């Protein structure tokens, strides 16, 4: 009951924040009661149908002001409407947000906070599992001109790590690739489906074709968990140990989401770390470049913020326990 009450109050808080934000940004004559009701209806749609392309686009728009670039743009827009002389604090806040979120030193601290619970020492030492699940959405770019091969994105090391886990496990585990269609492409279904490309790469890395299963319909973490649970249950592996390969910053949420659908013996195998472990050697060198803003640092901080916002959404849906934060 307490958990449900907390979720309801948090939803109300988010609704009030969004309402007041739009009141500030959208001219009063356009922000009518009808417009407010329409906005509320769209939010409800996004809640019950998060994978719908139109709804997911809406969620990206609604969450945009909460991300570093979005917050900066919104604050500067409000400042311009009010006049810069009267809005120096807003301009200063926008500058501070952009400066901190794009500075490598602060980005490393933010990433460290997000990744510190990626796995436990016991999980890190675990060597064998009945199945290896790769959350592959967004890990590759298709082999389309002018490219001459399938390309890996900056999260593509998930595929390399999955192949490594397969080779070192010694027990011929099942490798499940969960990656649906690329939403930014249309045309040849074989090339649009990212799971097919990941399968090709795994075959090239020595994983046998009869040990690879592709979940080609999932487009988000929750649908991946549901689909993978079905695949494992059909093969009698649902109660066996499963390795879950994902990026370190969302590994904790991924593990809890899979456990929520009934896969209780899930071991996180994170990769794609942004931070360096404190006390490790060689250690990250602190130099003047650590305090010069960069696009790469801004990308990292944006991803960490996006992961936090997504975790809040999953909590509100009842898919995560409060301890995820």
Image (spheres, rainbow, N blue to C red):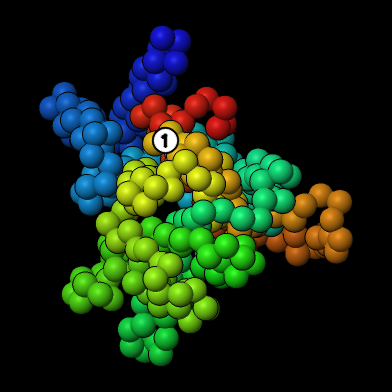
Q: Observer-nearest residue: 106 or 143?
A: 143
Q: Residue furthest left?
A: 34
Compared across the picture, whether 23 is left or right of 30 comes to right
Q: Residue at x 30, y 61 (%)?
A: 216
Compared across the picture, whether 237 is left or right of 163 comes to left
Would residue 55 be seen by someone viewing this image from the given angle?
A: yes
* Element carrying mark 1: loop
Q: Position of residue 31 (x, y in %)?
A: 21, 31
Q: With respect to residue 78, does 247 lie above or below? A: below
| Picture quadrant of residue 141 | bottom left
Q: Position of residue 82 (x, y in %)?
A: 40, 36
Q: Residue at x 39, y 27 (%)?
A: 318
Q: Observer-nearest residue: 81 or 51?
A: 51
How many discs mark residues in the rendered view?
1
Q: Residue at x 81, y 60 (%)?
A: 284
Would residue 250 be seen by someone viewing this image from the given angle?
A: no
Q: Position of residue 273 (x, y in %)?
A: 64, 57
Q: Position of residue 52 (x, y in %)?
A: 22, 47
Q: With respect to residue 173, does 321 lie above or below? A: above
| Picture quadrant of residue 194 | bottom left
Q: Which residue is mark 1?
A: 262
Which corner quadrant holds the N terminus? top left
Q: With respect to residue 170, does 320 lie above or below? A: above
Q: Observer-nearest residue: 193 or 182?
A: 193
Q: Residue at x 40, y 20 (%)?
A: 7
Which corner quadrant holds the C terminus? top right
Q: Observer-nearest residue: 176 or 152?
A: 176
Mark 1 closeness class: few <14, some 14–19, many ≥20 residues within 10 Å = some
| Picture quadrant of residue 97 | top right
Q: Residue furthest top?
A: 1
């Amino acid at each position: 009951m307490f958990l449900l009450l907390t979720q309801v109050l948090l939803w109300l808080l988010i609704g009030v924040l969004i309402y007041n934000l739009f009141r500030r940004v959208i001219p009063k004559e356009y922000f009518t009661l009808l417009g407010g009701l329409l906005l509320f209806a769209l939010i409800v749609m996004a809640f019950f149908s998060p994978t719908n392309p139109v709804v997911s686009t809406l969620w990206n728009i609604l969450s945009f002001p909460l991300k570093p670039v979005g917050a900066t743009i919104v604050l500067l827009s409000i400042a311009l409407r009010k006049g810069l002389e009267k809005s120096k604090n807003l301009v200063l806040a926008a500058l501070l947000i952009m400066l901190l979120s794009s500075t490598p030193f602060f980005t490393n601290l933010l990433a460290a906070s997000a990744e510190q619970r990626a796995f436990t020492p016991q999980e890190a030492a675990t060597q064998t599992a009945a199945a290896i699940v790769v959350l592959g959405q967004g890990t590759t770019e298709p082999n389309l001109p002018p490219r001459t091969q399938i390309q890996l994105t900056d999260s593509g090391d998930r595929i390399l790590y999955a192949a490594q886990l397969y080779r070192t496990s010694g027990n011929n585990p099942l490798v499940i690739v969960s990656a649906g269609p690329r939403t930014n492409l249309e045309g040849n279904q074989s090339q649009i489906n990212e799971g097919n490309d990941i399968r090709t790469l795994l075959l090239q890395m020595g994983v046998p074709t009869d040990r690879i299963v592709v979940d080609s319909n999932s487009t988000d973490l929750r649908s991946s968990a549901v689909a993978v649970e079905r695949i494992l249950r059909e093969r009698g592996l649902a109660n066996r140990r499963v390795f879950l390969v994902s990026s370190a910053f969302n590994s904790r949420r991924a593990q809890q989401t899979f456990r929520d659908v009934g896969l209780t013996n899930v071991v996180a195998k994170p990769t794609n770390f942004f931070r360096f472990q404190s006390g490790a050697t060689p250690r990250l060198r602190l130099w003047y470049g650590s305090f010069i803003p960069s696009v790469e640092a801004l990308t990292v901080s944006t991803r960490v913020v996006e992961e936090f916002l997504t975790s809040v959404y999953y909590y509100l849906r009842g898919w995560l326990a409060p301890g995820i934060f």
